[in-house]
Image: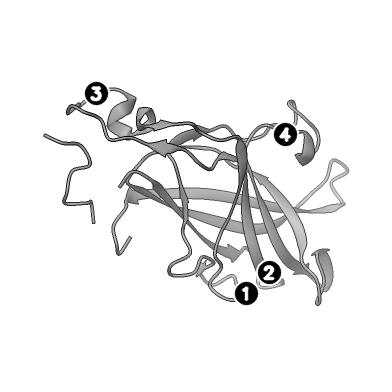
Amino acid sequence: HALAAITFQGKTESNSMTVKIGGIDFCNLRTSGTFTFPTSSTTSGDTDNHVDCFSNQGTAGTLSAGVASEGVSLNSTGYTAISATDGAMMLIPQTATPWTRATAATAAGQTGTYLVIHCHLRYNNHDFAGSESTYGDIYVPYGENFEAGKHYTVSLDFGVGYGEDGKTQQVEVTLSAKITPWTDEVDTPTKPLYPN
């Protein structure tokens, strides 16, 4: 397949923490382009990953994940699927560089890529993001070399850390990505994308 697929799952690091996910946005990605089949077979270079097959790429934009249900609740016993069965983010092959605070201190000033997690996060009876009736936003820098025909399963781990004073609690979200061939189950396509 000419595109990459991304799905999300998550869990908490403590049974004293509750997290309800309302949605996830992936910001500052190239979200459009014109795909042209190559006229000859190739086995090397970016064309093999379809990067060179996309022209007229639009400006950086935002993709939103299709969540499994309104308000996906996470727990500490194992990962819960956040993305709907048919809710994978689909994006053109690209290298996404995560934001850094050295580039800009706020999300609005960033050119790097990041996730915005819309959620209600509560720990020890204290709301860190959102409330019972509204979702708050947590920003997580994330970048990757997204390759065509690959399925990226992004695992989000919600925990609580401490500030510089060693006392002030702060939300910590760590992530890891498992990369597998993309299939309808999400199998490697049997029909080659390039003519022989």
Q: Is residue 52 above or below residue 156?
A: above
- As shown in the figure, which amino acid type bears the numbered disc 3? Ser
Q: Where does label 3 land, which residue?
A: 44
User: Which residue is tagged 1?
Assistant: 73
Residue 119 drawn above or below residue 61 = below
Q: Considering the numbered disc 1 on the image, is that residue within a helix, a strand or a loop?
A: strand
Q: Amino acid at mark 4?
A: Gln
Q: Position of residue 98 (x, y in %)?
A: 61, 35
Which quarter of the rendered picture does the C terminus lie within?
A: top left
Mark 1 and mark 3 lie on one chain; the one further toward the N terminus is 3
Disc with the residue nearer the chain's start (2 vs 4): 2
Q: Amino acid at mark 1?
A: Ser
Q: Which comes before the other along the chain, label 3 or label 2? A: 2
Question: Where residue 2 appears, x then y in whole percent?
Answer: 33, 43
Q: Residues within 10 Å of mark 4 (few under 14, many from 20)?
A: some
Q: Is residue 146 visible?
A: no
Which residue carries the number 2 mark?
19
Residue that lies at the very extreme toward the left in this rendered image = 196
Measuring 61% from the left and 37% from the top, which residue is drawn there?
60
Asked if disc 3 and disc 2 are in contact, CB closer than 8 Å, the reply is no
Cα distance in 3D space between marks 4 and 3: 33 Å
In the image, what residue occupies the spot 64% across and 63% down? 23
Q: Which mark is residue 110?
A: 4
Q: Amino acid at mark 2?
A: Val
Dot 4 or dot 3, earlier in sequence: 3
Q: Which is more toward the observer, 194 or 152?
A: 194
Asked whether the residues under the numbered discs 2 and 1 touch, taking CB atoms below 8 Å apart as contact, a structural biologist would say yes
* Residue 86 percent location from the top left of the image: 43, 67
Secondary structure of the residue carrying tag 4 is loop
Q: Are marks 4 and 3 in contact (CB under 8 Å)?
A: no
Q: Is residue 189 left or right of residue 3?
A: left
Quick one: label 1, few (<14), some, or many (20+) residues within 10 Å? many
